[in-house]
Amino acid sequence: MVFSVHMAVIRISHIGKRFGKVKALVDVDFDVDKGEFFGLFGPNGAGKTTLTRILTGQLTQDSGEGETMGVPFTDGLGIKRKVGIVPEAETPPTFLTAQEFLELVCRLRDLDKIDKRVDRWLDFFEIEEKRDVLCRDLSRGQRQKVMLASAFIHEPKLLLLDEPFINLDPIFQRKVREYLADHVKKGRTIFMCSHILEVAEKLCTQMAIIKKGRIVALGTLDEIRSSKDEGLEDVFMRLVGAGE
Amino acid sequence: MFKEELRLHKSFVGGMGSGFFPVMIFIFALVLAFTSPVVMKNISKDTILLVLHVAALMYGLSVGALGAIGEQVMTRRLGQVNMLLQLSQLHPITFRKIMATFYLKDLLFYILYSIIPLVGGIAVAAPFAKVPFTSVGLLAITLFLTFLLGMSLSFVLSALAVRSRPAAAALGILVVVLVAMVWPLGYLSSGQVLPTLGYWMYRDPLYLLATTVIVIILSSAAVLFTKERFETKQGTYKSMLLPSVERFAFTGDLKVLVAKEWVELRRSGAMGPVVTGFLGPLFAVYILAWFFRTGMGLPISFNSVFYGGMVGFLGVMTYSWLTNLEPNEFMNVQPATVDQVIKAKLVLYFMLTSAVSYTYVTIIAVINGELGLLPLALLVAASTTVYVVGVTARLTGLWTNTMLFDYRVQSKFFGAIVPPLIIVMVLSFWISEAPTISMALLAVESLAMLGASWFVFRSVVTRWKKEHFAFATLTAGSGASS
């Protein structure tokens, strides 16, 4: 009996999406295998967030199909139950405290040992003393930490992260980076959009570059660079165009 | 700033909705002016002037609390909303100067948006109602000045409150004392406290001049009181989510979301407005009934069944408040759907309003000596409440305040709500003439509304299950309707 080593946790098949006259995604087609740290890169407005929203069932594609963790993109609730998501823009609820928000997430996900989980992540992000502060009164960095904690708290097998390092100081950028690397070592999967290319270069095992809704490069860094000396930033500039 | 205001308004209510409000004001004023000869036969001119000027004052008071907005914007309490008000954080301009401009911009906006349509409606009807144009012009001036008085008073109170709550409270108490000197104490006349009304009482232009001076003084004081720097306050709150989940365990699968809604309602400070937003209109219905009976001289008996129907209709305001607490966009990445949050809000709505509604109807029945009508009145109250809030949730989801300004949603809403409500009203008036048949028809209608509600509530799920929590933002201006 032969087992395939490639088990796709995200399967994207010829996805297209328009917003009015704007083609946001054009025939996007690739898989993300289990255990990969997958990075999606592209300039502003290239379609990264749109694709992430489709993969997480927040947005419906116009054409094509696909699955996340075996759940069709059309079943948003099913996908959200199985994965952890850090969105690009959304912030935690205005009138709940940091602790209450994490408790809410635990209850929505039917998790056990709620106190232990909440304490662990408040401690990880060093915001224990802010646990009783309303999320609206937290700094931007603290709010981002709460959003990250809410995605990590159920230890999902797949994390979809849209600019996870935004507003984090260098100490926590490193701490989150190490956590994510460890997450992948345990056989779990990460799909990440980021503009911080030097971080992505260190972490990503597979990557795609998107430009005007089309995938223009796909593979490992070695596969998409033209020479051994070319870094991810150079690849990005070459494919996307520094002047654009 | 004016462009920002127009675009902000348009983003909330859409292009058509943005133009709809002044049209409604115009029509309202037109109808009021047309009916004024009938009204003036039954209500004195002084009473009408008092009501109009108090309404203008209250309107000004309700829109003038700009001092509080400054603090919210400068301390990021408006979340991701960025406004020109924040310019002074990075640019060489004082916050006082920006606030003064913002105040003038608001003034211009309200003149164009509500004062001109109001006066325009009265002016168009003036020849038919045999009201001289000079009176319309004078009324426009006194109403405008009264509105300014309310707005400047509210501005100074809010600006003062940011600096010193006791000072703002003292000024507030002074205003209350002045009002009390007029009523109930009777030491002063209403014209002495509200000078624009004094003009109508004594026909002395000095009253108009005095109002203008007071407005300038209050506005200038408000700008002077405006703080230049704000500090973010960080209150701490013990977690009450999990205890609330246990408390609402009886709501089954919805208990977590109901608990979330409950905590947000308590923390946001919206409990007061939610309750008064329900009790206020109930009180207003009494006033309206008085107006129709006494003012218009209509021989109609407003029985407890009529009030039962009104209770159901007025619940829309409370539901709207509940949908305004939190944008909920963070829920996009959690395993919950829009329809589940709507259901949680509906559960909370029924918990908040049911006891008040039925007590209100019962009190009316007792006062009117109609205990025999009480079971029917309660049935009517229950069925209209369930039906109206069901239709509201189905058509507007979590964005009632925004979507009800969309003319397409609005027309569907009124199409679904108004006919059954008119039938309830007509049948309730008919009880005194033909009790058996009218009561039987009311019972049948109530049961029909309950039956219809079952389908409406089911359709809430199909309509909203797949929608995004940022639905209103994503569809702003497109006139999204179901």
Image: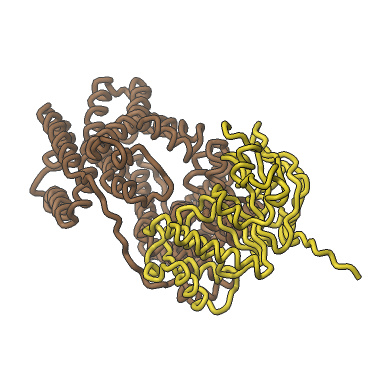
Q: Please state, as top left, top right, bottom left or bottom right, where the N terminus of chain B lies in the image.
A: top left
User: What colouring method underlies this structural image?
Assistant: by chain
In front of the other: B328 or A212: A212
Q: Please state, as top left, top right, bottom left or bottom right, where the C terminus of chain B lies in the image.
A: top right
x, y percent for residue A131: 40, 69
Q: Residue at 25%, 31% (x, y): give it.
A: B144
x, y percent for residue B136: 27, 25
The vertical placement of B295 against B358, above or below, is above
Q: Residue at 52%, 49% (x, y): give it.
A: B421
Q: Residue at 40%, 33% (x, y): give it.
A: B4
Colour chain B appears in = brown
x, y percent for residue A125: 46, 67
Report if residue B150 is visible in the image: yes
In front of the other: B470 or B255: B470
The vertical placement of A208 against B209, above or below, is below
x, y percent for residue B15: 50, 32
Taking the image as shown, residue B145 lies to the left or right of residue B328, namely left
Q: Residue at 60%, 62% (x, y): give it.
A: A84
The vertical placement of A147 against B207, above or below, is below
> How many dots with numbers?
0
Quarter of the image holding residue B275?
A: bottom left
Colour chain A appears in = yellow
